[in-house]
């Protein structure tokens, strides 16, 4: 029977949750020695969204998931798996994916993934394979983060970058392949450039060390991303059987607008390619940034159904993942 079913996988719907609270650079500069001009020119960020206390990861992830399901016209009961990417879940022993599944009213298998800023593309890669293998008919993939919980708001190296939000896709069976093979990997030997300091174990032994917060050697992360990620993006196109000339929309992880520009230059993407710039008003939302950015491009009509979009996530670990999708 299953031999007659389509074996392709496609993105069927996209959803987003953006906390209403807008935090501009002036507000950030009340806590760090910086300026609106420095932040805009070095990162491309003019404002970002911060979640209020009651905007938990659960609220944001479920909001984005509900939007993606509605956009896809898929009932939660039709899901075969819920995958949620996050690196900021404060309750990992009751995994976020299971909480989201329960909030959606379903008891399907649910798995939380931590691949930091590449987490959404990791989830999408797994979802594609689950659908193509016939393990699940529909898979929900969510990226959700409250990075403000693990940011030192007095640290001028990180306070202006990180933010909160969630984005989601529904992936399902399709006649035509709409999600290309994922190209992914890790580079743990270089992982010390980004992490929590102190880590939770050290903090527990000695609370005087202060609460764990993100510590980043920004310049080294920047160099790694700008130099290595174009090769990964190119490999994702090759794996999907397309060339860079076939790409209509480029949606890299929204880490820094200058990293995006460096990748566009290295890949020699023509001016006709629509390049995601959600970081300007969303900041860096780690695993949520790619679905949030695509959601905005679709809403604004800059990415249209049938467009070919190249996605690439990269971040702490270090980890990376990329694939080509067809915009629903
Ligand atoms: O999500 C995935 C992981 N994260 C990333 O991909 C982020 C990657 N890195 C970056 O985006 C950039 O490295 C930053 C935006 C974080 C920093 O930009 P940068 O151009 O790499 O700045 P820098 O750290 O090299 O610092 C340049 C100068 C330094 O001054 P001197 O030594 O040139 O006099 C810093 O002290 O800017 C100074 N600086 C600041 N000035 C004003 C550093 N932070 C600030 C600040 N405001 N907030």
Image (cartoon, helix red, strand yellow):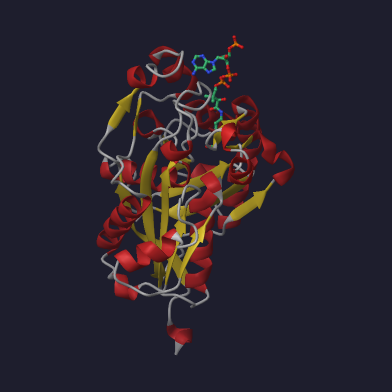
Query: Residue shown at 37%/75% (left/top)?
Result: 107
Q: Indicate which quadrant contains ligand 1.
A: top right
Residue 105 picture location, percent across and down: 29, 71
Tell how many labels: 0
Give the quadrant of residue 163. Answer: top left
Query: Residue shown at 49%/77% (left/top)?
Result: 135
Give the quadrant of residue 21. Answer: top left
Rendered-image quadrant of the N terminus:
bottom left
Who is closer to the viewer here, 16 or 305?
A: 16
Who is closer to the viewer here, 150 or 70?
A: 150
Rendered-image quadrant of the C terminus:
bottom left
Query: Residue shown at 49%/40% (left/top)?
Result: 252
Is 257 left or right of 216, judged from the image as shown? left
Q: Is residue 43 above or below residue 19?
A: above
Residue 18 picture location, percent across and down: 30, 42
Q: Is residue 10 above or below residue 40?
A: below
Q: Which residue in the rendered view is the most extreme toward the bottom?
A: 1
Residue 186 picture location, percent across and down: 67, 49
Res 237 visible: no
Who is closer to the viewer here, 47 or 250?
A: 47
Give the quadrant of residue 164. Answer: top left
Res 139 visible: yes
Residue 225 picture location, percent across and down: 61, 35
Who is closer to the viewer here, 227 or 7?
A: 227
Q: Is residue 214 above or below residue 324?
A: above
């Amino acid at each position: 029977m299953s031999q007659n079913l389509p074996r392709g996988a496609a993105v069927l719907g996209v959803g987003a949750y953006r906390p209403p609270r807008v935090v501009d650079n002036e507000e950030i500069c009340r806590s760090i020695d910086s300026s609106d001009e420095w932040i805009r020119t070095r990162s491309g960020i003019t404002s970002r969204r911060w979640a209020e206390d009651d905007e938990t990861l659960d609220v944001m992830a479920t909001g984005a998931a509900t939007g993606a399901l509605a956009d896809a016209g898929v009932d939660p009961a039709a899901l075969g798996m819920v995958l949620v990417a996050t690196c900021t879940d404060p309750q990992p022993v009751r995994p976020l994916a299971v909480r989201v599944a329960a909030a959606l009213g379903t008891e399907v298998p649910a798995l939380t993934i931590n691949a930091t800023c590449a987490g959404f593309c990791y989830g999408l890669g797994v979802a594609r394979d689950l659908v193509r293998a016939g393990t699940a008919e529909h898979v929900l993939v969510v990226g959700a983060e409250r990075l403000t919980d693990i940011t030192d708001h007095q640290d001028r190296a990180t306070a202006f970058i990180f933010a909160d939000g969630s984005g989601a896709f529904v992936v399902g069976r399709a006649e035509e392949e709409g999600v290309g093979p994922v190209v992914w990997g890790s580079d743990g030997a270089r992982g010390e450039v980004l992490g929590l300091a102190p880590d939770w174990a050290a903090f527990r032994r000695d609370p005087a060390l202060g609460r764990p917060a993100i510590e980043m050697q920004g310049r080294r992360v920047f160099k790694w991303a700008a130099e290595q990620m174009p090769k990964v993006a190119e490999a994702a196109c090759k794996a999907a059987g397309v060339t860079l000339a076939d790409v209509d929309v480029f949606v890299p992880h929204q880490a820094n607008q200058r990293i995006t520009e460096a990748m566009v230059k290295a890949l020699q993407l023509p001016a006709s390619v629509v390049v995601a710039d959600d970081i300007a008003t969303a900041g860096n939302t780690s695993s949520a940034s790619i679905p949030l950015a695509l959601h905005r491009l679709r809403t604004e009509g800059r990415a249209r159904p049938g467009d070919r979009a190249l996605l690439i996530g990269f971040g702490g670990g270090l980890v990376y993942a990329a694939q080509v999708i067809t915009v629903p």
